[in-house]
Image (cartoon, grey):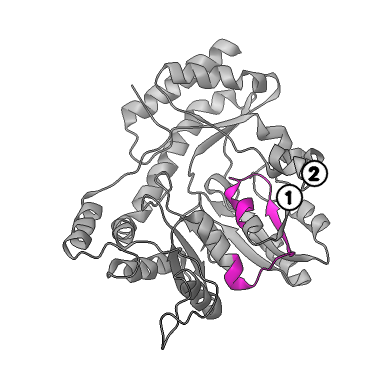
Amino acid sequence: MNIPVSKPDIGVLEKKYVNQALDEKSISGVFGTFIDRFEEEFAEFCETRYAVSCSNGTTALHLAMVSAGVKEGDEVLVSTLTNMATFFAVLYLGAKPVAVDIDLNTLTMDPIDLSRKISVRSKAIMVVHLFGHPTDMDQVNKLAKDHNLLVFEDCAEAHGSTYKNQKVGSLSNVGCFSFFANKNITTGEGGMITTNDIYIANKARNLKALAFGVSNKFMHQDVGFNYRMTNLQAAIGCGQMARANELINKRRLVARYYSERFHIFKDHLNLPNEMSFARSSYWMYHIVLKSHFIEKRSLIMNSLKDLGIETREGFIPFNLQKIFIDRGMTKPSECPKANSIAYASFYLPTGPDISEKELDYVATSFCAIFNSLI
């Protein structure tokens, strides 16, 4: 067998809509009906007033912060354990990212460490709903209100996740999504910001399309970006939206199956949690090894690879990234809890189209390998 960590689940409707866009020759990010439709449907899905599409998740983060008023020199407090695109977007602005440690139960931002790191230079907080699990937003939002800070949600891995029955992307000033091929909802590439703030939505819509003028198109209103999503991508998105809940529930079923099979190893590894306040979309089934099993990570992953099962290491925190340490932007000791899992984690195939046979093969193979190490 050859089982990737994830591959897109593209159905009949996605193909129909793409062909419609091709037949209409509406393939750019300027013309076509699917862009507006996708934005409207995604806003409704996230329970927000507005959604603005863009070219990918990283540009969504950048566009959100620019539109909300984050500027050069501002400090943005960011959950340290994430894909580094979250931090890159802050750096594109000339702002200063401040690494915040994680809660080991959820792997998301630790409000206690957040409270310690807020300063007079702080402008915003960027939470990351990692691997589909929401951050504890009540505590984050209270700190933001107390210190007059903006809050952004990196929802790249959490489409459809809920915090106290409220969708991620609607819990802050702006939510930011990715539609990369392995995401819960995909357009191949692509991104979206969600907000209830009409000013931010209008600003983002203008900036993402080169800030063209109104009465005279080429008298630009601002220094804009070329961050448009194409109508072809939006056509795929509209097809995905028709079965968004189905796609997310498939990942939840995969996660439940793995947890039932791997519960026997609970003394040796940490399985993904789902806190009482959360409903996770389980973007990927992410395992954290304990004690001496940490040094066996490569052996386990390579053994699975030999059996045709792809795995992927967990993210390395910002405060352990050599490029940032060397520039004096952070130091390893800043986030000890994130450090404790940086080289101890990996994730298993969790795609929505994984078959029951493949799922059993992955779980059985993992159990056999792990049992041989106990």
Residue position for label 1? 99
Residue 19: image quadrant is bottom left
Between residues 19 and 151, which one lies in front from this camera angle? 19
C-beta proximity under 8 Å, tags 1 and 2: yes
Q: Residue 1 carries which label?
A: none
Q: Give the range drawn in magenta.
A: 65-89
Residue position for label 2? 334
**Place of residue 84 in the rendered image (x, y in percent of width and height, measured from the top left):** 61, 46
Secondary-structure class at tag 2? helix
**Place of residue 59 in the rendered image (x, y in percent of width and height, measured from the top left):** 51, 59
Q: Specify the amino acid type for callout 1.
A: Ala
Q: Specify the amino acid type for callout 2.
A: Glu
Q: Residue furthest left?
A: 23
**Place of residue 321 in the rendered image (x, y in percent of width and height, measured from the top left):** 69, 39
Between residues 44 and 253, which one lies in front from this camera angle? 44
Secondary-structure class at tag 1? strand
Residue 175: image quadrant is bottom right
In the picture, the quarter occupied by the N terminus is: top left
Q: How far apart are marks 1 and 2 (CA)?
A: 7 Å
Query: Is residue 64 part of the magenta span, yes or no?
Result: no
Is residue 241 depicted above or below 8 in this figure?
below
Q: Can residue 161 be seen in this view?
A: no
Query: Is residue 81 part of the magenta span, yes or no?
Result: yes
